[in-house]
Amino acid sequence: MIVFTNGCFDIIHPGHVDLLRRARELGSKLIVGINSDASVAKIKGPGRPLQDQESRRAVLLGLGSVDEVVIFDEPTPERLIHEIRPDVLVKGGDWQPNEIIGADFVESYGGKVYSLPLVDGHSSSSIIERMNSEVPDESVTTDNSIARRSLDEHLRVFASLIAECSDSIEECGRLILDTVSRGNKILICGNGGSAADAQHIAAEFVGRYETERRALPAIALTTDTSALTALANDYSFERIFARQVEALAVDGDLLIAISTSGNSPNVIVAVMEARRKGCTVIGMTGSGGKKLASLCDACLMVPSQRTARIQEAHITVAHIWCEMVDDLVRE
């Protein structure tokens, strides 16, 4: 009875040990999939992992509950799950069953999927945040002007964007170019302030070009339930984007999923639906958006936790992607 779970396991803490022990109790063999170093960097951002993949693998194999550790390079373990065909698929309680990669596949042949409650008070991210909080930020201005503070913060974020996110911007841009080159369309979703970003980015794709060309086929999904009568009878907030993806997307399309926190339930559910439909998925989030990043083919993680700074960067990057399309046309 094979049990499978996955994660980065960068800093092993008591919560990990407890989860792995309970996962092992659900079967006779526990296989743990861990993200490669390159994959962790895409999901967690610059500076991660703190330990290389072989070190993380060695630590896990030292636990009595773990029988085997497999390293995978992709952002998600979907390929690995299809190869292993586990009897039981496990994730921590911060993942709802409908957010777990591979759940549909495992259930299709009678396997079980569990989201196990986590031990409170333990997370790798919080440990790293406590470590970083001890280092003073010498770049913080002493000027009390809101304008000056905001502009200084804006410049710091964009300097970090250049230093840390250029590869991600290029990778996402290539996926967009591949999609439109095939003649497929782009769907964009985001709620709250990110809904405005989605509409803005769709408008950029449709109309903002420096060369004469036809507009890209881009659609901003809506949170207005009155506009969805023709699509579905399920108007629940969590499913509102997913129902539109279900109705509009086809294999080969691309979804740009925007969530500054990376945890918006309706955006996450839309991502899972897009994956089921055979779409490529790009995430746009902030530095804390690790859940969204781990579900996407590529992700832009703006190095900030301030919503205003994240949204500014999202719009700027959309202009860059338009420039990439312009370059493609010129060629």
Image: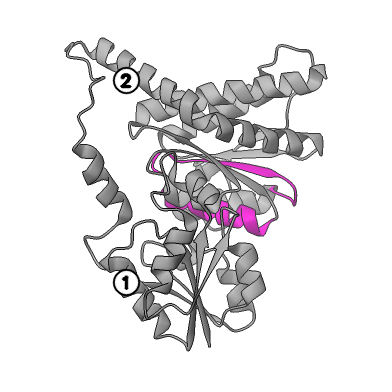
* Up-down relation of residue 280 to residue 198 (above or below): below
Q: Is residue 321 magenta?
A: no
Mark 1 or 2 closer to N-term?
1
* Up-down relation of residue 318 to residue 123 (above or below): above
Count residues near mark 1 (Cα–Cα under 10 Å), then give few for <14, some for 14-19, many for 20+: some
Q: CA distance from mark 1 to mark 2?
A: 39 Å
- Can the viewer see residue 34? yes
- Say left or right for 323 vs 140: right
- Residue type at mark 1 is Val
Closer-to-camera residue (188/319):
319
Q: Position of residue 27 (x, y in %)?
A: 47, 87
Q: Position of residue 37 (x, y in %)?
A: 51, 51
Residue shown at the point (23%, 22%) measured from the top left = 138
Callout 1 secondary element: helix
- Residue 17 is tagged as 1
Mark closer to the observer (1, 2): 1
Residue shown at the point (35%, 79%) measured from the top left = 21
Q: Position of residue 287 (x, y in %)?
A: 39, 39
Closer-to-camera residue (267/78):
78
- Residue 229 is tagged as none
Write down the quadrant of residue 246 in the picture: bottom right
- Say left or right for 211 vs 288: right
Q: Which residue is mark 2?
A: 153
Question: Which corner quadrant holds the C terminus?
Answer: top right
Is there a contact, CB below 8 Å, between mark 1 and mark 2?
no
Callout 2 secondary element: helix
- Residue type at mark 2 is Glu
Closer-to-camera residue (4/325):
4
Q: Position of residue 102 (x, y in %)?
A: 58, 67
Q: Which residues are magenta?
A: 249-277
